[in-house]
Image (tube, rainbow, N blue to C red):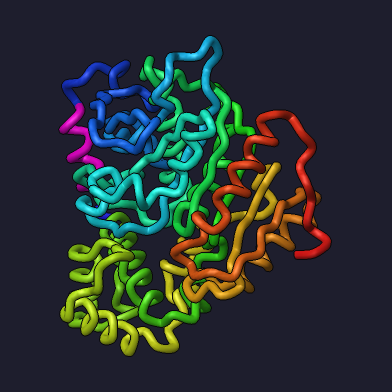
């Protein structure tokens, strides 16, 4: 709690001199054109205002991309792309990466005429702790990114949007759909798509078969939540291993094209041993917070698409399938894409089908329902 109060005080002091209107959630602060973009794509590196679940304002960053074409007579359709786990340190923001365009499956939608809004979320690319897998805070940053994109005249973004995300971004997409009606009634959610989404956070951190990935993701989670909310890690690890958890989180961004350094490997192996047989669901206050930030199947609106690989070693397929069945039991139909690739390619493997499904929803067609075969 002490950390949260200190962060809040620093935030208030840093923005005190700004007029209230300038801090309004969803207001664009800046949009810097990006020179080196894929063919047919124009893009801007943006800053805008958002709020966390406690109403505290934050400046956040991201990228907005649109077709490199004349402004159309009607506003363009929008897809909010919610990225997977890149890390929790400020330097891990996707918008800072030279590999942003090649690593972002959502950019494929620009060639279909969409504006793609890709938020970094709070604390990535900006100097505050990233609320890793904290549903409301992430949803706010996504919805405010869609709002801010409307202020870029060259993007010609409209009010109608779909949200599509992968891994951590799948969790973000589902939370964005849950929060859209109450937090951003000025926007119209058309569809939600989630590839390999963590839904039951404790189960996902417990049941993924890649124990090394689980240890790194657990380190991200513990460091983020303990820093933001003052949660003690004493029930999870001793003080030496808490230091290793902190260093893993502070020093490492997820990179699919580079091998981890020896120190990172040794740190992960240490945390694997230290957290063996530890279930975050049974360790307070982490267990309660994990439950609060898991996705409530009863609150996710349709139309909904979920893509999940049966061979995923990070997001356990059984957890995703259990969530999907729960959504179906509540009367919401799901388009279910069953895949066989690895976790890191979940969005790429399902991209063309997902974009086609989203387009069909914008066109007003009735959504398919695969609940009987999930």
Q: Quadrant of residue 197?
A: bottom right
Relative image position of residue 171 (x, y in whole percent) = 51, 54
Residue extent of the magenta highlight:
6-15
Percent x, y of residue 370: 78, 56
Foreground of the two, 144 or 182? 144
Give the quarter of the image for residue 213. bottom left
Magenta stretch, main secondary structure class:
helix
Residue 366 percent location from the top left of the image: 79, 37
The residue lying at 29 percent from left, 55 percent from top is 228
Name the quarter where the N terminus is drawn: bottom left
**Residue that protrudes farthest toward the right in the picture:** 372
319 to the left or right of 152:
right
Asked if residue 170 is positioned above or below residue 241 in the image, the reply reads: above
| Picture quadrant where residue 190 is located | top right
Q: Magenta includes 14?
A: yes
Q: Where, quadrant-wise, is the C terminus in this rendering?
A: bottom right
> Outermost residue, top direction?
73
* Residue 193: in magenta span: no
Nearest the viewer among 238 and 254 is 254
- For the point 66% across and 59% down, the residue is 337
Residue at point 63%, 39% (across, down): 358
């Amino acid at each position: 709690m002490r950390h949260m109060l200190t962060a809040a005080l620093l935030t208030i002091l840093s923005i005190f001199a700004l007029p209230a209107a300038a801090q309004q959630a969803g207001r664009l602060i800046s949009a810097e054109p990006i020179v080196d973009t894929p063919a047919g794509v124009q893009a801007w590196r943006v800053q805008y205002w958002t709020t966390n679940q406690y109403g505290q304002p934050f400046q956040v960053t991201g990228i907005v991309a649109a077709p490199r074409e004349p402004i159309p007579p009607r506003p363009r359709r929008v897809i909010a792309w919610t990225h997977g786990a890149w890390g929790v340190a400020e330097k891990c923001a996707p918008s800072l990466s030279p590999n942003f365009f090649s690593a972002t499956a959502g950019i494929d939608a620009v060639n279909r005429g969409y504006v793609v809004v890709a938020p970094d979320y709070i604390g990535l690319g900006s100097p505050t702790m990233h609320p890793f897998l904290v549903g409301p805070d992430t949803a706010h940053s996504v919805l405010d990114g869609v709002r801010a994109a409307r202020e870029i005249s060259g993007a010609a973004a409209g009010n109608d949007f779909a949200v599509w995300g992968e891994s951590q971004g799948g969790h973000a997409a589902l939370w964005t759909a849950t929060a859209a009606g109450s937090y951003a009634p000025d926007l119209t959610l058309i569809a939600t798509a989630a590839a390999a989404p963590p839904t039951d956070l404790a189960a996902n951190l417990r049941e993924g078969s890649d124990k090394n990935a689980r240890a790194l993701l657990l380190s991200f989670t513990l460091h983020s939540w303990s820093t933001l909310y003052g949660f003690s890690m004493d029930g999870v690890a001793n003080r030496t291993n808490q230091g290793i958890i902190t260093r893993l989180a502070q020093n490492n961004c997820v990179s699919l094209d580079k091998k981890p350094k020896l120190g990172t490997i040794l740190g992960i192996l240490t945390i694997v041993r230290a957290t063996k047989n530890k279930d975050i669901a049974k360790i307070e206050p982490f267990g309660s917070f994990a439950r609060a930030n898991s996705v409530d199947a009863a609150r996710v609106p349709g139309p909904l698409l979920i893509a999940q690989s049966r061979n995923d070693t990070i997001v356990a397929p059984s957890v995703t399938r259990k969530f999907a069945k729960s959504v179906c039991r509540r009367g919401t139909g799901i388009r279910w894409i069953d895949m066989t690739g690895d976790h890191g390619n979940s969005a790429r493997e399902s991209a063309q089908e997902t974009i086609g499904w989203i387009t069909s929803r914008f066109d007003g067609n009735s959504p398919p329902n695969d609940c009987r075969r999930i």
